[in-house]
Image (cartoon, coloured by chain):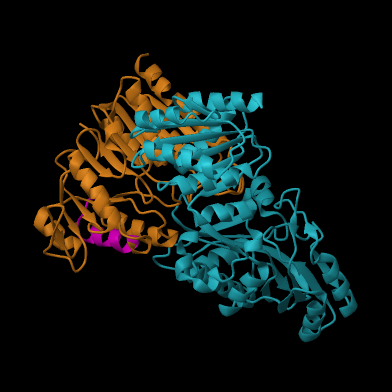
Chain colours: A orange, B cyan
Amino acid sequence: MSILVNKDTKVIVQGFTGKEGTFHSEQCIAYGTNIVGGVTPNKGGQEHLGKPVFNTVQCAVNATDATVSMIFVPPVFVADAVMEAAEAGIKLAVIITEGAPVRDMQAAKAYAVKHGMMTIGPNCPGIITAEECKIGIMPGNIFKKGNVGLISKSGTLTYEGANQVCKEGFGISTAVGIGGDPIIGLSYKQLLPMFEADSETEAIVMIGEIGGDLEIQAAAYIKENITKPVVAFIAGQTAPAGKRMGHAGAIVSGGAGTAAEKMAALEAAGVKVVVSPAEIGKAVKEVLTK
Amino acid sequence: MNIHEYQAKQIFAKYGVPTPRGIVANTPAQAVANAHELGGNIWVVKAQIHAGGRGLGGGVKIAKSVTEVEELASEILHMQLVTHQTGPEGKTVNKVYIEEGADIQDELYLGIVLDRAREMPVIMASNEGGMEIEKVAENTPEKIIKVPVDPAIGFHSFHGRRLVFELGITDKNEQRKFIDFAKKLYNLYMENDAELIEINPLIKTKAGDFLALDGKMGFDDSALARHPDIEDMRDISEEDADEREASQYGLSYISLDGEIGCMVNGAGLAMGTMDTINYMGGTPANFLDVGGKANAETVAKGFEIILKNPKVKAIFVNIFGGIVRCDRIANGILEATKMVDVRVPIIVRLDGTNAPEAAEILKNAGINNVISATDLGDGAKKAVEAAAAQ
């Protein structure tokens, strides 16, 4: 078991033949991801990386029965690509592209929700079910199969956390990089119940950061609904207020969205909160061997 | 990206959002000419910097004669203006805005920001204008009215009615004017990909007109490419020179107060590295994300920018190589140390793809101020020790 994706998931790639799309699709195929085709307008009928290319997402879905799309199109085309995927009946869009305008994502996400399509990202490393299916840009070799679910706003902290979990002798069921933009798709609150319901997952690591209140919402949800142990780290305890720390959404504005308030809320919800990401592995070991 | 008050008011004017008349000046002589052009017998001389609280800091003053306009412009231009938002060093004033005086009856607040929880813009209004809105929000949150607007339907009359009734505007003519004001402001927020608009104060004149007495705007950096007119309003003197230089090399840099320079890949890990240094008893000197395309040149540039800060006593390079291969980063560090004279210990933690090869490269290079670390915790600890020993 795992959440959202596994070895049977049929995946298409929007922006398949571009430089980034090509490089990462190749890596995903090598990992074992079932990529069944890609979409690049005006290249329909061609073959790329041994897979068929289609002009539209609708054509790709009709021909392949794909349910997931990995999106690599340039930032200003992201909203268009997401809405096209939703319209074509895709169930989950994983948006890797960084730098999509907020106004575009607002409209695209609202449209996706209306069509019952889930989204992950934008500006994220993607999703990986260890040793089965990698939809994104993470280094697959770090993720050994195991019983820890991971949700993170940050790409490199996803790798850091997964690596520590594996070094402690555990492994990852599914890891989801949700992205650090002001408007994102699936968040902690939607993913936590999936891990709670997943028989393979025994503990959950959540990595958050300053800005917004998704971690606070997660804390409230955990308190009421999650029985599996949760380990959390919130990045940006030492970040100055009013400064955007790399991610578009990582900013403490008007005194709200601080690491301290998020850590306090999670602790109050019974989560094991670590002060440094260097402690994630040890904390997972502690909660799993209790 | 943020813009000045006078620029925000140019955008307001384009959309028919009423403001007092005003003209920007770079010199006292221009200020005088502007006052003559505006006419009247009362003017406001306003420092143009990207920070709130200008009035309290002495950057906004009223002139009752043209001579006084000249005196005040001379006083304010090139002053180092300190407000609660500038930090203790303040900001140099390069421009003043000369504005006609307004006859104020009431001071309100009107703003629009993205409500991240609702995932749509929210209009905020208050009768407590002219004060620090953060303080109003903290002490008396009930005095701030919040009306979210779903862009799928846009601004409708009912949004406007909520605003005016909750603000207690009872005169029908005034209601109409206020709703029109708010609607135009919402439209300009959306059409320009603004991130924030604040009008504090928005005044009601004795004649019952609403005017934007101030104007603050910030924009979504990711959308600037489709707004060249707004990109043209960029004032680079308002931006941190080091941050700007770093961004030209694809580096995301923010300077802090501490002693340990940080060079990290990924924004989350970069913050996590700062937090770990702090946890180990040290102080981070900066945030620096080298991004996914780090090479010898960008690493060298990173060292150069970090070392501009004389307080730096050690540098912690923390890379978790995913797609980026650690051996390339190791070679980048070697190249960089030839290009830049790194005077302090460099603690290097390279993990992930090709980490063993990277360790070998660094070992064989035999640079005496490079200290290898096995993981994040070990690296942060060694960096704190190295800085303390300096």
User: Residue B70, percent across and down?
Assistant: 86, 75
Residue A202 picture location, percent across and down: 30, 24
Q: Is residue B227 left or right of residue A116?
A: right
> Along the horizontal axis of the image, is A31 left or right of B44?
left
> Is B56 covered by the magenta stretch?
no
**Dominant SS type (magenta):** helix
Q: Nearer the viewer, residue A16 or B49?
A: A16
- Check the image and report above or below for B280 versus B249: above
Does the magenta portion include A84?
yes
The answer to whether any part of residue A162 appears in the image is no
Q: With respect to residue A251, does B33 lie above or below?
A: below
Q: Is residue B146 left or right of residue A269?
A: right
- Whether residue B39 appears in this view of the structure is yes
Where's the N terminus of chain B, which quadrant? bottom right
Q: Residue furthest top?
A: A290
Q: What number of labels is visible?
A: 0
Please give the name of the residue rendered at 47% of the width and 62% of the height, measured from the top-left corner. B149
Which x, y percent locates residue B119? 44, 54
Measured as percent of width and height from the top left, residue B314 is found at: 60, 32
Tell me which corner region of the image, top left, top right, bottom left or bottom right, holds residue B211: bottom right
Give the quarter of the figure containing the C terminus of chain B: top right
Quick one: A230 or B245, which is closer to the camera? Answer: B245
Q: Is residue A200 left or right of residue B48?
A: left
Who is closer to the viewer here, A144 or A216? A144
Magenta-tinted stretch: A78-92
Q: Residue at x 62, y 70 (%)?
A: B8
